[in-house]
Amino acid sequence: MKPLLPLLAALPLSSFLLLPAAPAPKYAVADIPAALREGAHAVLRADDEVVTVKSAGRVVRAVHRVVTVLDPAGDDFGRHAVSYDALNTLGYLRGAVYDADGHLLHQLRAAEIHDQGVGDAGGSFMTDVRIRYADLRQPQMPYTVEFDYEVASENALFYPDWQPQEEEGLAVENATFKVTTPAALPLRYQERKLPKGATVARNTTGSQETYQWQLANLPAVDEEDAAPPLAYTTPAVVLAPGTFEVQGHKGTAATWQGLGQWSYELNAGRDVLPPATIAKVQALVKDAPDARTKARRVYEMLQGSTRYISVQLGLGGWQTFPASAVASNGYGDCKALSNYTTALLGAAGVPAYVALVGAGSDRPDLRADFPSSQFNHAIVCVPLAQAGKPDTLWLECTSQTAPFGYMGSFTGNRHALLVTPQGGQLVATPRYGAAENRQERRLDLFLDDKGGATATARTLRTGEEQDLYAQLMHELGPTDQKKYITDHLKLPTFTLTRFNLAAAPTKAAPGVVETLNLALPGFAAPSGKRVFIAPNLLSRLPALPAQVGERQTPVWLSSACVHADTVRLHLPAGFKPENLPAPMQLSTIYGSYSSQFQTLADGTIQYVRRLEMKRGQLPATAYAGYLDFRRKISAADKAQVVLLQTES
């Protein structure tokens, strides 16, 4: 066999094919400023978004996004998902991944893009929403991913928002946002938390107007304790249409009245009930003494005859099923069930309205100063009058177990858009404060002379304090309920010997009673002739970690509540208290706290604790005081009783 090199040398130069040069490196990690890498799990190298308003009914959004993943905590940025449906068409999704030096590792192939439908465990089976997603995560860090995609939307009710720093631990090297719209469709926007120099640059060319924003060199942020959501603290530009069109239905979002008018007209005429249903309702309420009683009977009928499904089919995200369809089928989404309920109430002679709301126990209130579609749920508002005074009733129509007239943390303490024939009107949903949100616990702790103990606890929770426990009671069986409680009891060694949850409605708000029996081996091991016991077993409020650096965000105390505890410590024969902690009392702008110990006539030691937390929004400078308030409570909650053994 002849050597290969001499043969190659004998060939003319024209016989060689020129191989393409390797692409030049880009997005090298070394190019990231050190200040942006500090405290960051990932760095957004580029976030270039272009929004083009084609018409009142069509908006196109193109995104180029590059993220460098620095450590495992930022690994989720290595994948990306884009949703689409009948009204939103995904034009393309492209991607690539680079190593730490910026060399191309892999170009995303079409076969690697996954496509799947969207559903949930609650019965969301009527949806056309799908997701395409790509996973370019790498085992070796750091690495950089690059994604490009375009979505054309025929649903101009929603314009894209821009908030590059959407998660904690994400630094931003560079981000741009460009919006082009016909001059006849002027852009509505709101700038939030933008640094100096990042405000809009605007120009007009012919019949087109262009708006542009840019952000650069934003260090990573961490979510601080008792702080607003990141959506309220990092730079953002929020867009909304003035006039818009969805599948031929024109409207305006420039005012709350106009947005509500569009929703009303979209659903007008869909509240007609079958004659048999009307007759059933009228028979149900014929002897009801007042409108509230009629509403209660109608609500109980609704809960006993319908169930919730999710409907997200094109315009079906906003246009309800007819009430007649719900009457026949026995199911509907939040809009359909709310529309059906107003129709039932109408048949009972009780006027009611559908209201749109942003639902979620951790969702902040809507931005009242920027009319736009900020809603994901529908409920029912029933304006009543008792003795000449307003007495508005609110109904959650998607639950078969929700108490009559109760909104809770899911939709309470916020604003909703009342949809009336005259258009939309912002109204407040019920407010739940310390009078409603209560936790009242009585605990009896029985010590034995070997250092063991048993305890019985009865806890009544009302209002928002009972929301989670009501969900456990209705949605989980006894075994899963017990597992949840066991997993969340912060005790070193114990056995849960008895457990029960039961409904306990109160005058102020719905309630749930939890009953626990506990075995606590080795709870109070003697130290010589003394035993040290911290009677507050179940209600300790932890201290907050010390603030690192200067506080950046306001203090948001999101819930008002009262926790009241009475603990009775039953001593074995031959023991008496040697020392009881001094009483403690605090009164601040954040809330109040008190605790005291006393020996009762029968020798039992009683510990009484009361904590009230206030709801409020305070400046960042108030955090030091809040930190001190929590520290003092945490220390007081650990107070120990010293028992002395007087005889063998």
Image (spheres, rainbow, N blue to C red):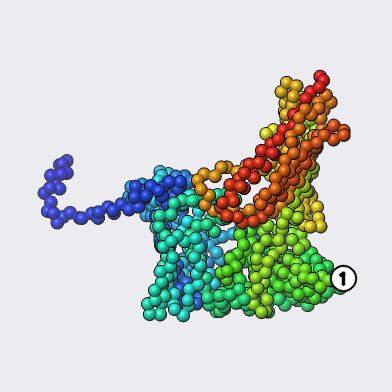
Q: 114 or 240, which is in the foreground?
A: 240
The residue under the point 79% across, 52% down is 503
Report whether 227 appears left or right of 580.
left
Q: Secondary structure at mark 1?
A: loop
Residue 174: name its quadrant.
bottom left
Image position, residue 102 (x, y; %): 33, 50
- Which residue extends farthest top? 648
Q: 94 or 551, which is in the foreground?
A: 551
- Please state, as top left, top right, bottom left or bottom right, where the C terminus lies in the image: top right
Image position, residue 30 (x, y; %): 34, 47
Residue 615: name its quadrant.
bottom right
The residue under the point 69% across, 39% down is 636
Image position, residue 129 (x, y; %): 55, 64
Indicate the amino acid at tag 1. Answer: Pro
- Please state, as top left, top right, bottom left or bottom right, where the N terminus lies in the image: top left
Q: Is residue 567 above or below residue 194?
A: above
Q: Which residue is mark 1?
A: 289
Residue 568: name its quadrant.
top right
Q: How many marks?
A: 1
Report whether 258 appears left or right of 482.
left
Report whether 141 appears left or right of 409.
left
Report whether 45 appears left or right of 443.
left
Q: Is residue 223 visible?
A: yes
The residue under the point 71% across, 23% down is 527
Q: Is residue 555 above or below residue 247?
A: above
The residue under the point 85% across, 32% down is 603
Q: Is residue 301 visible?
A: no
